[in-house]
Amino acid sequence: MAGLVKSTKISCLLAFLIPLAISMVAYESGIDFLLSKWLDFSDHGAYNHGFLLLLVTFYLLYSTIDFNRDISIKGRFIGFVAAALFMMLAFAFEVISIVSLQVVAFYLFIVFLVLAVYGWKVFKKAIVPLGLMLFALPVWDGLGPILQRLTLEMSYLMVKAVGIPILKVGLYLTIPAGKFEVAAGCSGFSYFMAAFPLALLYATSNFRDKKNIFLVVGVVVVASIVANWIRVFIIIVAGQMTEMQHYFVTVEHFNLGWVVFGFMFISLVFVFNKTLQEEGDVINTLDTVDTLEKSQSSIVGRRPFLFSMLLGVLALVFLGFQYQVVKFYKDSDEEVVAANILIPSLFKRTDHLSGLEPSINGASEAFYIANEYDPPVQLYHALITNQVQGREVVSSDNALFNKGIWQLISDQVESGDGPRKIELKSKLTGKSYLLWGWYRVDGKDTASGIKAKWYELLGYLKGDNSG
């Protein structure tokens, strides 16, 4: 019997790992993007906790699931269908270079692969551990500007409340001793990202009442945001008291937030343990052993191996498609495509588009200028034919202007598919700048990133999605 159980564990593990391994090869660019975020220590490493969460997830799966008794047949077919669906979605996002959504689709593929191989009972127990990995996916960046604005407003109110004269202009807070910029790195995003899974792990490990779990998670997450407000407040007060010479101002101010948050978290844990009461004083940790109507071999059956084989074949098909896509774009002639994009004759080639400093990853770039106008009209042209990860027409890595040099005054899109009109002001000279921009993908013009991605997909289906 022991040999049979061991064989069952190994068989189910192989049924899970084989399609997973092939899919990871097929979606290599998405995996590279995820790992690069986990290893990126710039901007205070918002996703550096990814490896830690992965280890915690493995530990929770190992400690909460009894594979000897929890493997079941129920739910496997639904899991197979869902896993196949998200595998196809991951490939579609790979094709049109939306890497963040590809990572989400691949994550959901793994979640439902668990259901397809191990059944409903294992899936229910694995939901919370696998849910922790959601907070390691690089899809939360949209929260950064919101937290940045909250930090700016609350820091302003807190400093004003203690009697220090303070002026708020844009993202800058000015006190008699000097000026502070509440930059993106000051938003507290990294504290927030670490607090959510930490709170969820603590709550689910110590409480079973859902009300208590929601309360604990909510309070800890709010505490992480407040900790960042306190951090900025301390830095500003220290700057005022020391004429901007304090250690927190001149050298180190980020880790101060971790100290504040750590103190708040430990204090909250002490309070939670003393005040929150669970229904039922004693929780029986020994589960009642149900009589198994079927042997492990019959529970495992042939179905998970069939599902595993089908998903593996599907991943191999997508791997072949991906090879063809990359080969096609490697063989494309960028100069031929460039010749189809006409530049008005009044524009002359120049070496550099002065002042604007746009950045496009993996593009053939060209700069033009028309001196007939006063001031001269400058044109920046970026051509991208290789639509693979890192060479996207529409990407957060591509920027029309340097936010460190230019202050955004207004940003609006003309009606329909009209161009995007951006008004800028130089932080260095105070001069205004008017910028018009749009995408041209598959022969269509639009200022919408969403529409550009849609046109890119249509172009891919026709064999050309350059832009």
Image (cartoon, rainbow, N blue to C red):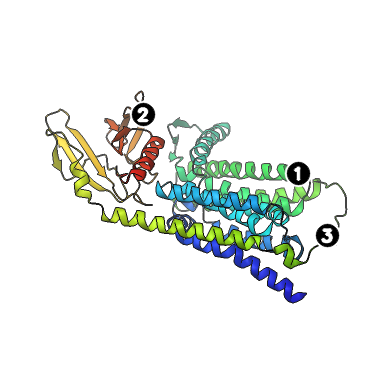
When asked about the image quadrant of residue 174, the answer is top left
For marks 1 and 3 on the same chain, the one whose residue lies earlier in the sequence? 1
Nearer to us in this view, 275 or 111: 111
Q: Amino acid at mark 3?
A: Thr
Q: Is residue 303 above or below residue 105?
A: below
Query: Counting residues from the N terminus, which is met first, the one under dot 2 or under dot 1?
Result: 1
* Quarter of the figure with the C terminus: top left
Image position of 89 (left or right of 418): right
**What crowding class fits label 3: few (fewer than 14 Cα within 10 Å), some (14-19), or many (20 or more)?**
few
- Disc with the residue nearer the chain's start (2 vs 3): 3
Tag 2 near tag 1, CB within 8 Å? no
Label 2, label 3: how many angstroms apart (C-alpha)? 61 Å
Q: Amino acid at mark 2?
A: Ile
Q: Quadrant of the N terminus?
A: bottom right
- The percent coordinates of residue 181 (x first, y second) are 43, 40
Nearer to us of marks 2 and 3 is 3
Looking at this view, name the residue that lies furthest to the top.
415
The crowd level at tag 1 (other Cα within 10 Å; few <14, some 14-19, many 20+) is few
> In which quadrant of the rendered view does residue 321 lie?
bottom left
Q: Residue at x 69, y 56 (%)?
A: 119
Amino acid, disc 1: Lys
Q: For the residue labelled by badge 2, is the local secondary structure a helix, a strand or a loop?
A: strand
Asked if residue 363 shows in the view, the reply is yes
Residue receiving disc 2: 409
Q: Quadrant of residue 244?
A: top left
Which residue in the structure is indicated by mark 1?
Answer: 210
Coordinates of residue 369 in the picture (x, y in percent): 16, 36
The mark found on residue 373 in the picture is none
State the residue at coordinates (51%, 42%). Answer: 187
Q: Residue at x 52, y 56 (%)?
A: 48
Mark 3 highlights which residue? 285
Q: Position of residue 399 (x, y in %)?
A: 34, 42
